[in-house]
Image: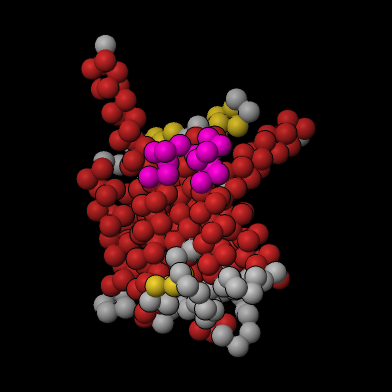
Amino acid sequence: MKAALRQFIRFGWEQALSCLFPVVIFASLAVTQLIQIPWLPRYDLLLLICLAMQGWMVHSGLETRDEVKVITMFHLIGLALELFKVHMGSWSYPEEGYSKVFGVPLYSGFMYASVASYLCQAWRRLKVELIKWPPFSVVVPLAAMIYLNFFSHHYWIDARWWLSALVLLVFWRTWVTYEVGGTRYRMPLALSFVLIGLFIWIAENVATFFGAWEYPDQSVSWRIVHFGKVSSWLLLVIVSFLIVATLKLVKDRQAPVQLGIMG
């Protein structure tokens, strides 16, 4: 029991370090709701905090330049989704800000980037490896279909449950292994998707409570985000993981080739 408890504490510590960027964002949401700067709107202050945090993580070595490239890509992907969803009325950012573009504050992209930051950090800290990963020719189109469904379901059918079933089919035999305190563990990849999606839904409730954004049914007073949103976050996590995993695997395959050329 003592050994299991030590491993659990080690795992929690590594997860906490991996979640540093998201934790800073949530802490900033709470602090900026209580403390306001008269000449600087809250959304703009949050953007400055996110930029400073990103710069510090690179300068301190907590994030590599390659990881920053991945995170930047997620920022742009998330911002594109935010612009569309706000336009469609799915949620809103009711406060004023100089850095708002078509009703979307630019800091919002960092909330998606923080998910990528967590995945990159956890991948490196826990020495993640994938077993029986499907071919890229299957993974890339699946990620694209999931992302496009966030847009297309406003005009056509919502295929999220079909896509979820397809994810289970594609990754049925895929496992993720990770290391804690020198001991390796493994779990089904689909289970890790569900767990991460559930924790992000919990974080979403915290974020909306502190006014990060606002759903239509929260305009009068805050209420718990509908549990059905877990499915949306689950699919977004899958897209995020597929992109990070694909880039990591491509880089790992290129490394031996580069070493061979140098030799």
Residue at image position (60%, 32%) is: 180
Pick the quarter of the image with the N terminus: top right
Percent x, y of residue 247: 34, 40
Pick the quarter of the image with the C terminus: top left
Q: On screen, 153 above or below 21?
A: below
Magenta stretch?
55-69
Percent x, y of residue 78: 40, 62
* Residue 65 seen in the figure: yes
**Which one is nearer the viewer's eye here, 22 or 174?**
22
Residue at image position (46%, 69%) is: 99
Residue at image position (56%, 37%) is: 60
The picture quadrant where one finds residue 262 is: top left
Q: On screen, 262 above or below 127?
A: above
**Which one is nearer the viewer's eye here, 185 or 150?**
150
Residue at image position (63%, 28%) is: 181
On the picture, is 208 further left or further right than 102?
A: right
Query: What secondary structure prevails in the magenta region?
Result: helix
**Which one is nearer the viewer's eye here, 51 or 181?**
51
- Number of marks present in the image shown: 0
Percent x, y of residue 156: 26, 77
**Which one is nearer the viewer's eye here, 28 or 252?**
28
Q: Residue furthest top?
A: 263
The picture quadrant where one finds residue 100 is: bottom left
* Residue 226 seen in the figure: no
Q: Is residue 66 magenta?
A: yes
On the picture, is 194 further left or further right than 139?
A: right
Q: Is residue 130 magenta?
A: no
